[in-house]
Image (cartoon, rainbow, N blue to C red):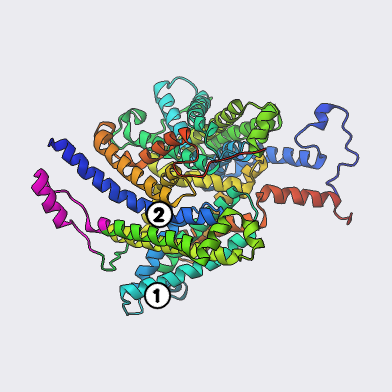
Amino acid sequence: MPEQLVFAMEVFLNGLMAGVLYALVALGFVLIYKASGIFNYAQGVMALFAALTLVGIMEGQVPFAHLINAMLGTEIHHFGWHVPGVLAILFTMAVMVGLAWIVNTLIFRHLVNQEPIILFMATIGLAYFLEGFGDIMWGADIKKLDVGLPQGINLWIDETTFNIFDYGFFIDNLDIVATVVAALLVCALVIFAQYTKQGRAMRAVADDHQAALSVGISLNFIWVMVWSVAGFVALVAGIMWGTKSGVQFSLSLIALKALPVLMLGGFTSIPGAIVGGLIIGVGEKLFEFGFGPMLGGATENWFAYVLALIFLVFRPQGLFGEKIIERV
Amino acid sequence: MFYREAGDFKTSYVDDNQTFPIKFDRYRYYVVLFAAFAIVPFIINDYWVNAVFLPFLIYAIAAIGLNILTGYCGQVSLGTGGFMAVGAYACYKLMTGFPEVSIFIHIILSGGITAAVCVVFGLPSLRIKGFYLAVATLAAQFFLVWLFNKVSWFYNYSASGQINAPERTIFGIAVTGAQTAPWAAYLFCLIFTFASAIIARNLTRGMTGRKWMAIRDMDIAAEIIGVNPLKAKLSAFAASGFFVGIAGALFFAVYLGAVEVGEVFGITKSFLVLFMIIIGGLGSIFGSFAGAAFLVLLPVLLKNVLVGTLGWPTDLAAHLEFMIVGALIVIFLIAEPHGLAQLWRVAKEKLRLWPFPH
């Protein structure tokens, strides 16, 4: 086998893995958009906030330590205990549910019936607020997140591929875990949406708010629930990305990576988010591999957007999006 | 008491259609203009020009540009930073390529170049709508920034990858470069802001502007009554690009003097200008000014209070600023989705009656 082709295959596999991570973030977007028509720009910051909270709880950090120290002149930083990973994840989940409730009660209940663009702007405001809030609460320094996920090169794949192609593929264990987790998450979400009472209510709300209200579904409850589920997805994405590259501000930028995925897959489709994520992940890695050196590198910054843009010109609702029907 | 239409008789259509039909408003406008042109240049110092006036004037132009596209024509754009970068780099290439031509012409030309680029990126808007378009304009943002970073022709192969504004003069007075007097930079930007506001105001209340608004309110219905969506949308992109390009050129040449594209014209700039028009008011020229003033003054004020008065560390103040800006945006959207301009309109309505109850 020619060497270039083997390299391309490795790039392809790594692209698939990266795509799964993009899809994880995109999933959170789709959930909220389907259920409430809100395009939640703050999803990336929610992932950052979840990861920050998780690290903070695990390390026993004092919330707002920086602020308290600045105001009172004290020198407190840590409570001095360490919380095990699983327990910390549960605590963080509780925080995310609380956040969902606050966001819904304080912001989106007051914006019912506003135009979608106003809701979108409100989520950008929320993103800014959460970003500042997370930094003030837990500090802005780069943190290491380790909840016990395996990391580093997968030796089995390395050996197997070496025996076949004379060249060992570098696949990170973490990426494999992320893929499995994402698959489980999607299955769980589909089962939840199709077979549980709350899931059916969620789909009803997504279909038609007023009709759902008239058959006795509480919109408030559903919205809090959806934001909580999105918070959970954000937490999972935050753990994966945080373990991969440290918990820091740039984590919130993965929201920007998820946007072309959404465009490609369609804003309303869960399978679309997965397929879109895979296409974008593979596409940008292969493009960088093939044309990056020619164009000066770092094409990953824009390739996904241009790909999605070109695609949308031919199919404006994305791959799996609902057909847009406009009436006067 | 003073804010009355009574007694102010209009005897011609021109009178009837003027921008400020109420006498009080008109005089207030003249007073503001007089103060801006004849008083402020004599009393400002370096700090005020660089911290407040220049960013305010330049962001006002950018906000007017984005307001035309988003507020009047309804096409949400997240590519403002990228388009400002086009203006800046076009201005740089023109300044270094044709040093004998006046910088005044360079800046207007860079507006024109940005308009052309903007039209190209506006083409998908004919097929893509709403959020999909907003995300699609991000393609412009990331692609343009990458382009200016990677293709060294744009920064004349300089080793640092930065662009630096050479010194240029108008009537013998330096307006760019290190030797610029604060008042000269201020007046130079003020002229552009003033002209932009007048042009934009007249564009938006004329036939072109009404077509944009028809497209914004419902593009299919607009098409049925005879508005050509291709022309209307692309002209909005072009007009928007023109103003944003001028803002970018001024931002680089007069305000900063040296620019590294990823830092200055990144995605945060796009959001900043978007916030300005939301807080100021979508579809209002006054709103563009109000929003720009608000978001330029707020950080200066917060910094002075938190760092200067309370003595908190700067990073903490920066985080608080994020929180406050975010919270303000949400509060504004809940309390008044139409922004400061709407508050201003309501205040004027009340003023017309004051002090009588009806």
* Magenta residue span: A150-176
Instruction: Kindly give the residue lying farthest to the right in the view shown.
Output: B7
Where's residue A136, x and y in %?
Answer: 44, 66
Q: Disc 1: which chain?
A: A
Where's residue B152, x and y in %?
Answer: 31, 30
Specify few, some or many for label 1: CA neighbours under 10 Å numbering under 14, 14-19, or 20 or more.
Answer: some
* Measured Cα–Cα span from mark 2 to mark 1: 28 Å
Specify few, some or many for label 2: CA neighbours under 10 Å numbering under 14, 14-19, or 20 or more.
Answer: many
Of residues A139 and B332, the one drawn nearer to the viewer in this rendering: B332
Secondary structure found at label 2: helix
Task: Pick the quarter of the image with the N terminus of chain A.
Answer: top left
Of residues A118 and A75, the one drawn nearer to the viewer in this rendering: A118
Where's residue A263, x and y in %?
Answer: 45, 43
Please give the label number shown on residue A25.
2
Residue lying at 56% horizontally and 55% vertically, measured from the top left: A206
**What is the three-letter code of the residue carrying label 2?**
Val
Secondary structure found at label 1: loop
Task: Pick the quarter of the image with the C terminus of chain A.
Answer: top right
Q: Are marks 2 and 1 in contact (CB under 8 Å)?
A: no
**What is the three-letter code of the residue carrying label 1?**
Val
Specify whether residue B174 is in view: no
Q: Is residue A75 above or below residue A267?
A: below
**Image label count:** 2
> In the rendered image, which quarter is residue B193 located in?
top right
Specify whether residue B23 is in view: yes
Please give the label number shown on residue A62.
1
> In the rendered image, which quarter is residue B60 located in?
top right
Residue lying at 38% horizontally and 51% vertically, measured from the top left: A23
Q: Disc 2: which chain?
A: A
Q: Are marks 2 and 1 on the same chain?
A: yes
